Image (spheres, grey):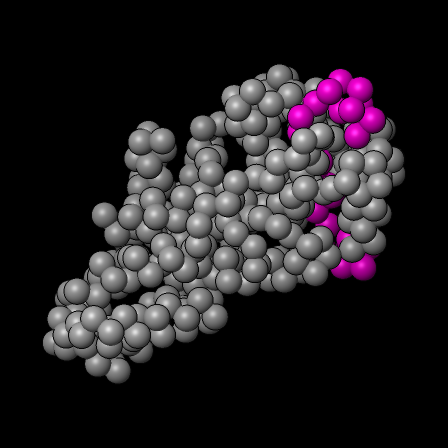
């Protein structure tokens, strides 16, 4: 994990230069801890796409800490804020396990790296000794199943797919039966990422969920894949999928491509579900379980 921490620090360099750089200027430029300092910090958080909810909560927590610890030097607030960011992000929550087949439903709009994320998760789980099967339930996008097939070969995970345009719920049904027959540990389900009609999206995901619930007692996780580079747009996606899919965890990709890594804070607040994995590059090892303390440390060090 030391290797990943190094890649995380490197991946967060754009965020560090802008977001943390602006914070450092607030701390070093202020003569005292006063209302003007708090307002400046709030502005920096908002500009980094941390979102209103997370920004207000962090600044309020910082006010309390300053009062309780009687801090008077603005420079002392740096360490305090790093700890508060880690605390705000909560504890690392592993993927839910079950005695039988674990079914993880993966959702998100097209273009966020959903299928690639599924492939990398398959490799991660295979390294843990799990037998993994992929379900190609995005039957509306011509290349989706083909792309998943490539990741199936790369990861060594079996794939269940049907013809383009097939009923996604039928694909999931077949995949669950295949996973049971082959004594698989995990089934990763790819889904369509169309947002132009929320009603259709909700109906489709509801149908898939009913099949999983009936056949496997799941889904045991609903993982929402988000592209960190889309900033506030990612927060909007959280709102739609939270309502449509009962999201249990977030996978945040492309953190290395944005100067607004503060979006992690906003997503955690908006989703009411923990960030479980983050991606900081194209390599298969660049998707790893999210560690809030390491994330906060990589930002500030």
What is the x, y in percent for residue 147? 66, 28
What is the x, y in percent for residue 182? 75, 18
What is the x, y in percent for residue 101? 71, 30
Q: Is residue 58 left or right of residue 148?
A: left
Quarter of the image for residue 152 reads top right
Q: Look at 38% across and 57% down and name the residue there.
A: 87
Quarter of the image for residue 18 reads bottom left
Instruction: Farthest residue to the bottom: give it.
Output: 35
Residue 75 in magenta? no
Report if residue 232 is visible in the image.
no
Magenta region: 176-201
Quarter of the image for residue 200 reads bottom right
Q: Which is nearer the eye, 100 or 279?
A: 100
Report if residue 265 is visible in the image.
yes
**102 is higher (above) or lower (below) than 19:** above
**150 is higher (above) or lower (below) than 10:** above
Q: Is residue 104 left or right of residue 1?
A: right
- For the N terminus, the image quarter is top left
Q: Which is nearer the eye, 37 or 219?
A: 219
Q: Look at 51% across and 58% down and name the residue there.
A: 267
What is the x, y in percent for residue 273? 56, 55
Q: Look at 78% across and 55% down and name the residue there.
A: 202
Instruction: Farthest residue to the front: give it.
Output: 99
Residue 183 in magenta? yes
Q: Look at 81% across and 51% down and name the residue there.
A: 206
Q: Is residue 30 left or right of residue 287?
A: left
């Amino acid at each position: 994990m030391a290797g990943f921490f190094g890649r995380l620090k490197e991946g967060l360099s754009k965020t560090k230069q802008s977001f943390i750089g602006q914070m450092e200027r607030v701390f070093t430029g202020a003569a005292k801890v006063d209302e003007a300092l708090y307002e400046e910090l709030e502005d920096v958080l908002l500009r980094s796409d941390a979102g209103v909810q997370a920004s207000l909560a962090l600044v309020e927590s910082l006010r309390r800490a300053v009062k309780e610890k009687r801090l008077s030097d603005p420079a002392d607030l740096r360490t305090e804020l790093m700890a508060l960011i880690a605390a705000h992000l909560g504890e690392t929550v592993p993927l839910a396990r079950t005695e039988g087949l674990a079914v993880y439903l993966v959702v998100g709009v097209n273009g966020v790296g959903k299928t690639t994320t599924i492939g990398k998760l398959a490799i991660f789980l295979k390294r843990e000794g799990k037998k993994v099967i992929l379900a190609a339930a995005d039957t509306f996008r011509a290349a989706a199943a083909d792309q998943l097939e490539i990741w199936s070969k790369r990861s060594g995970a079996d794939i269940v797919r049907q013809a383009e345009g097939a009923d996604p719920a039928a694909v999931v049904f077949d995949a669950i039966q295949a996973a049971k027959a082959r004594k698989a540990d995990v089934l990763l389900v790819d889904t369509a990422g169309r947002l132009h009609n929320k009603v259709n999206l909700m109906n489709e995901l509801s149908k898939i969920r009913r099949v999983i619930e009936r056949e496997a007692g799941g889904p045991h996780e609903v993982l929402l894949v988000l592209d960190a580079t889309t900033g506030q747009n990612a927060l909007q996606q959280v709102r739609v999928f939270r309502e449509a899919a009962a999201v249990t965890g977030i996978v945040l990709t492309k953190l290395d491509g944005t100067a607004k890594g503060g979006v992690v804070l906003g997503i955690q607040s908006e989703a009411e579900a923990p960030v479980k994995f983050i991606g900081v590059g194209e390599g298969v090892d660049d998707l790893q379980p999210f560690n809030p303390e390491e994330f906060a440390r990589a930002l500030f060090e």
